[in-house]
């Protein structure tokens, strides 16, 4: 038998993080005391009222197919959220609920991109974006940024990357993996350039609510009607409501794009899990009083880790203003990120993600979605590791 793999699948980059991740898991299974900084998900539990709503729906037999783009109640609750919090007016028909924010991103590219199109992705980027763009047949155009600009793409860099083939500019603020947050002015300027060139903006706003140091989030869609018309907004329940395993995300988009996504979804996944959607309704319409406590705890960890990392010889770290990651610069250690992380795991049993996975080989990603005790233990081990390199 010829098990020829499709070009589409064969073109995907193997996950660089996988080797270290599976090594870390194996070490843990052997009973070793591994400190994991790899987590891309909150360490808090889903708030109880959200679980209750899903459990009730399940008990009541809400277990059948729903419309592919989500139940009307949830699409309305999402539209209401954008009205209330972002000043954006969407009809429920412009909201597509998908099986996680990742699935939303994928369907956006599938609905809008084709052979010959280019998608501008600032690096460091969330590692799935370029692979999704390739799956949609388009070409990822990577624009590198560094800690010198807090990992933000400059207007000139965006202009230089634009070509007549540019279809989408991808904006992710607050950012995974850097935690950087664009100011409203910076977002407007980048948005203006896209408007000028007729380029769509895909704005991944899943970390909207996780902000520190007085940082504010403003959606690029909210600056004017024209900005709104150029924006595809991606969001989800995973981060601010700690619902990663529920697989529930959404897109708010101009009507023709929403319709195309609905069609794609109706022929691929169909609806996101019925009773999970009821949990989503509860998440958006119920109390949000879990958030201040989570934010205070994230902030306490962020402040500690940022200060500690900067005191370690060979490391420097700009402070994150959002999400739950720090992205320290390791270039002064003389190691590239894969070797740094492999040796760190070997020598000190600390698992971090090499920056090369996000297109930035002079950095590593540390998630502080872990207990303060773990964070302290891990940072002290990183310090010993770096001192021993000298
Ligand atoms: C976590 C995350 C998502 C969505 O995750 P899902 O679990 O698929 O909802 C989307 N974008 C970024 C940048 C993320 O970090």
Image: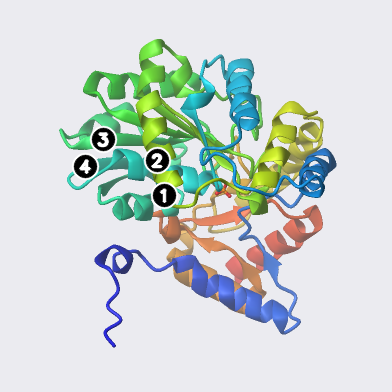
- Marked residue nearer the N-terminal end (4 or 1): 4
Around disc 4, counting alpha carbons within 10 Å, would you say few (fewer than 14), some (14 to 19), or many (20 or more)? some
Taking depth in this image into account, of 69 and 210 the one nearest to the observer is 69
The residue mark sitting in front, 4 or 1, is: 1
The answer to whether the residues at label 4 and label 2 have Cβ atoms under 8 Å apart is no
**Disc 2 and disc 1: Cα gap in Å?**
7 Å
The answer to whether the residues at label 4 and label 3 have Cβ atoms under 8 Å apart is yes
Report which residue position mark 4 lands on. 117
Relative vertical location of residue 227 with respect to residue 317 in this rendering, above or below: above
Residue 345: mark: none
Report which residue position mark 1 lands on. 267
Report which residue position mark 2 lands on. 263
The answer to whether the residues at label 3 and label 2 have Cβ atoms under 8 Å apart is no
Around disc 3, counting alpha carbons within 10 Å, would you say few (fewer than 14), some (14 to 19), or many (20 or more)? many
The residue mark sitting in front, 4 or 2, is: 2
Taking depth in this image into account, of 355 and 377 the one nearest to the observer is 355
**Disc 4 and disc 2: Cα gap in Å?**
21 Å
Report which residue position mark 3 lands on. 167
The residue mark sitting in front, 1 or 3, is: 1
Q: Is mark 4 within 8 Å of ligand 1?
A: no
The answer to whether the residues at label 2 and label 1 have Cβ atoms under 8 Å apart is yes
- Marked residue nearer the N-terminal end (1 or 3): 3
Taking depth in this image into account, of 291 and 213 the one nearest to the observer is 291
Seen as rendered, the residue at the extreme top is: 224
189 horizontally vs 103: left or right: left
- Horizontal and vertical percent for residue 5? 30, 73
- Marked residue nearer the N-terminal end (4 or 2): 4
- Marked residue nearer the N-terminal end (3 or 2): 3
**Disc 1 and disc 3: Cα gap in Å?**
24 Å
């Amino acid at each position: 038998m010829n098990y020829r793999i499709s070009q589409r699948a064969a073109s995907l980059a193997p996950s660089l993080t996988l080797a270290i991740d599976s090594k870390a898991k194996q070490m843990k299974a052997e009973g070793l005391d591994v400190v994991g900084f790899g987590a891309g998900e909150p360490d808090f539990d889903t708030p109880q009222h959200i679980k209750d709503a899903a459990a009730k729906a399940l008990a009541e037999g809400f277990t059948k197919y729903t419309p592919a783009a989500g139940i009307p109640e949830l699409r309305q609750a999402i539209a209401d959220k954008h009205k209330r919090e972002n000043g954006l007016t969407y009809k429920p028909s412009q909201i597509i609920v998908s099986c996680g924010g990742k699935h939303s991103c994928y369907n956006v590219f599938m609905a809008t991109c084709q052979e010959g199109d280019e998608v501008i992705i600032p690096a460091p980027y969330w590692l799935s974006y370029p692979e999704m763009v390739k799956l949609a047949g388009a070409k990822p155009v990577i624009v590198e940024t560094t800690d010198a600009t807090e990992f933000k793409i400059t207007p000139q860099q965006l202009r230089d990357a634009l070509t007549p083939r540019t279809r989408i500019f991808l904006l992710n603020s607050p950012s995974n993996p850097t935690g950087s947050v664009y100011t409203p002015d910076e977002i407007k300027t980048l948005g203006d350039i896209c408007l000028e060139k007729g380029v769509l903006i895909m704005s991944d706003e899943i970390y909207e609510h996780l902000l520190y140091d007085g940082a504010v989030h403003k959606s690029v869609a909210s600056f004017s009607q024209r900005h709104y018309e150029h924006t595809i907004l991606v969001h989800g329940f995973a981060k601010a409501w700690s619902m990663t395993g529920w697989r529930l995300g959404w897109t708010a988009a101009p009507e023709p794009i929403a319709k195309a996504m609905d069609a794609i979804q109706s022929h691929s996944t169909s609806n996101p899990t019925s009773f999970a959607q009821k949990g989503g309704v509860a998440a958006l319409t119920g109390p949000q009083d879990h958030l201040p406590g989570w934010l205070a705890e994230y902030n306490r960890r962020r402040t500690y880790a940022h200060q500690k990392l900067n005191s370690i010889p060979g490391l420097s770290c700009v402070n994150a203003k959002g999400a739950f990651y720090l992205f320290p610069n390791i270039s002064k250690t003389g190691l590239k990120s894969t070797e740094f992380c492999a040796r760190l795991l070997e020598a000190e049993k600390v698992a971090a993600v090499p920056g090369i996975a996000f297109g930035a080989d002079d950095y590593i990603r540390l998630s502080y979605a872990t207990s303060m005790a773990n964070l302290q233990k891990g940072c002290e081990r990183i310090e010993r590791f770096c001192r021993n390199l000298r």
